[in-house]
């Protein structure tokens, strides 16, 4: 199994609007996407990107706001009211092969692969199996979404 690049860092927030202002005004985000709902996952999502060196892409941050009390982000925010790092997402060329490999390593996969915010299949690995970090494994985006 070949683990690819870090695609993004997921950050839970009680307010995407306030977080966008922080990432723009304090952290220098230059690309800010339009927020959108992912009802099936119970979240509102917005991608922001910090500036890179010499015009290259910077670091992509996925802001996650809960859509109601049933959202997995709601319980995270109950423990961390100001929000904070929720997960790290790594790319793989083949989501099925990656899932089988991690399962073969005894890592707990949280649910079946499902459509993620980049329009590719994703799954999550239990933080207790990943040095305390909730880890998203996502199939490499094709084309411009990369």
Image (spheres, rainbow, N blue to C red):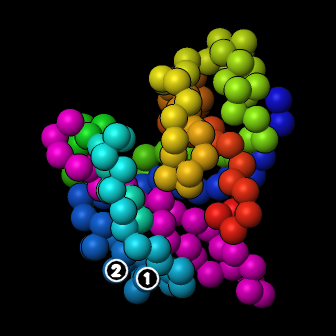
Would residue 140 be visible to someone looking at this image? yes
Relative to residue 53, is residue 25 drawn left or right? left
Relative to residue 71, is residue 94 drawn left or right? right
Residue ranking furthest to the right: 2
Quadrant where the C terminus is found in the figure: bottom right
Q: Residue at x 71, y 18 (%)?
A: 100
Work out whether 48 lies above or below 135: below
Res. 21 mark: 2
Residue ranking furthest to the left: 69
Q: Residue 80 or 142: which is nearer the viewer?
A: 142
Expressed as whole percent of the image width and height from the top left, the position of residue 104 reads 72, 12
Quadrant where the N terminus is found in the figure: top right
Relative to residue 125, is residue 79 drawn left or right? left
Expressed as whole percent of the image width and height from the top left, the position of residue 101 reads 75, 20
Asked if labels 2 and 1 touch by Cβ distance under 8 angstroms, the answer is yes
Under tag 2, what secondary structure? helix
Expressed as whole percent of the image width and height from the top left, the position of residue 39 reads 31, 46
Work out whether 100 lies above or below 4: above
Name the residue beneath numbered marker 1: 24
Q: Residue at x 34, y 80 (%)?
A: 21
The quadrant where residue 123 appears: top right
Residues shaded magenta: 47-70
Would residue 133 be visible to someone looking at this image? no
Relative to residue 13, is residue 101 drawn left or right? right
Under tag 1, what secondary structure? helix
User: Marks 1 and 2, how far apart in space?
Assistant: 5 Å
Taking the magenta stretch, the answer to whether it contains residue 60 is yes
């Amino acid at each position: 199994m070949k683990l690819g690049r870090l695609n993004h860092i997921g950050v839970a927030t009680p307010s995407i609007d306030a977080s966008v202002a922080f990432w723009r005004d304090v952290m220098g985000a230059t690309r800010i996407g339009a927020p959108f709902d992912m009802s099936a996952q119970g979240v509102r999502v917005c991608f922001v990107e910090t500036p890179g060196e010499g015009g290259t892409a910077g670091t992509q941050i996925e802001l996650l706001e809960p859509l109601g009390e049933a959202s997995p982000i709601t319980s995270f925010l109950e423990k961390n009211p100001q929000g904070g790092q929720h997960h790290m997402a790594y790319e793989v060329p083949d989501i099925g092969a990656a899932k089988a490999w991690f399962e073969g390593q005894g890592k707990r996969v949280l649910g079946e692969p499902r459509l993620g915010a980049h329009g590719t299949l994703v799954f999550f690995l239990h933080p207790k199996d990943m040095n305390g970090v909730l880890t998203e494994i996502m199939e490499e985006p094709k084309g411009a979404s990369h």
